[in-house]
Image: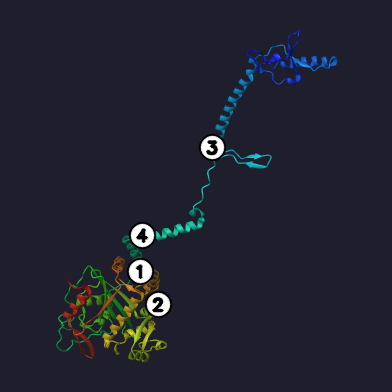
Amino acid sequence: MKEEGQSIFDEFETDEETGEVMIPRATVGVAPDLDEASSAPAVEEKASEEGAAGQETDEELPVLQFDFDFGEEEFAAPSQASEEDMVLQGIDEALAAQMAASLGPEEPVQDVQNGKKKKEPKNKKEAKGKTEPKKKKNLWTRIPLWCRITMISVCSLCLVCGLLIGTKPGRKIIYGLIAEYIDRNVVREDITPYPQPTLTPELPQPTGSVDNPLTPGATEGPTPTVKPRKEDYCYNILLIGEEALEYFGGSRSDTMIIFSINSKEKKMHMTSLMRDMYVQIPGYADNKLNAAYSFGGTKLLIETIELNFQVKIDGYVKVGFDDFEWIIDRLGGVELTLTAEEAEYLRTTRYITNPAYRNVVAGTQRMNGNQVLGYCRVRYVPTANGTHSDFGRTERQRLVLSKLFEQYKDSNIFTLLSIMNDCLPRVRTDVSKADMQELLQTVVENRMLSLDTLRIPVAGTFEDVFVGKSEVIQVKWPKNIEVLHGFIFGTEE
């Protein structure tokens, strides 16, 4: 072990004359100091010359001679230089890190040996070998984009439909749209009175004693005003089946039905008015009810009904016989049951105008428009219930309308809209768009799925009399008005 104060060069030989340390050339391993770099070449050149000279005369190994002494303090320089290099290297690394952060991620370094690009670490955890596992895609992101868009659209549509159908304000919007659609497609007409026809079907006053306080007899000129009954919870629509009369020079109302919607009792009513009832017609002599339409059209007919029956008519819907036949065909016909007598009568008469359709039989069958129209006009053959004459005819008309109502009351909105699109242009009405919307809302919101029927005059409140050669129905008005008001407006509390 090296003693304290002993130099590491004590083990080397020294020149006796000069005192220089003799170090073999092969043992030199210390780089010259940076400060003495300028003198190193001269020393090496001198040593080379001396070595070359000694080699010529002696075979001894050449040695390096130093003209200065080494001490332990000379070996501190390399360690100090190493510390400085480490500091400088740390500064370089810090500057490189700052530049890399400002310039963004580096491009992958190409591995020259393998010909592949080395993947640079994305973060500190990956640089240390602690890479995070990749997040798995959820089910929604795996669905194709077009499919996601379709699903979102369908869900949005369902939400909108749910809000429209599931909420009262939403349904009100739907009722408004339907009312707007109906209003654009129906026919609006002027209901000014018809001009006086060439043939005036005036009838003389009937003979005999008749209890008829509202029609005291045949009169000319204006009729006393009677205020008809009107209730806010009830809306009355007059349904008119119009028959054109070419020979008469005009038309007549072959079918007259008061269709009532009562929101108080949540019911719908249908009341047939006999066309042969002897009534008072404003401005004309007393006559049959259907004569009012011939004299003054829809306007005069409504005034006549309000006067005699004391019921306010809020609007009307009118269909001609040809249009009625077409609509029945569009609806797919009506399933009816004929008695043997009814079937025989329809086969042998002209009530079914097309001979090709006079093939009806007794029993239940589906009848087309031309057949149904003939069936509704029959009055000389009793019905299955034994009802005769015009009473039997109105019963058949109510039966057909009731069958149609039952046939389509459960249909979806798309089916009904398709039917309305075809049938509405054949319908004439004066019901306003606002009233249509209110009526739709009343019927649907109150779930009015039944239809009650009535005929005026009721049994036991009339008698048949002859006026000249014409047979008319003389009505006992007080009783019929009482029954009619109770049926339309409901019982009073």
Residue 262 vertical placement versus 3 (above, below): below
Residue 84: x and y in percent read 60, 22
Tag 3's secondary structure?
helix
CA gap between label 3 and label 4 equals 53 Å
Marks counted in the figure total 4
Q: Which mark is residue 247?
A: none
Q: Which residue is mark 2?
A: 330
Task: State how the image is colored.
Answer: rainbow
Q: Nearer the viewer, mark 3 or mark 2?
A: 3
Q: Amino acid at mark 2?
A: Arg
CA gap between label 3 and label 2 equals 79 Å
- Marks 1 and 2: in contact by CB < 8 Å? no
Q: Nearer the viewer, mark 2 or mark 4?
A: 4
CA gap between label 2 and label 1 equals 17 Å
Q: Earlier in the sequence, mark 1 or mark 4?
A: 4
Give neighbour class at mark 2: few <14, some 14-19, many 20+ (Cα, 10 Å).
some
Left or right side of 39 for 310 = left
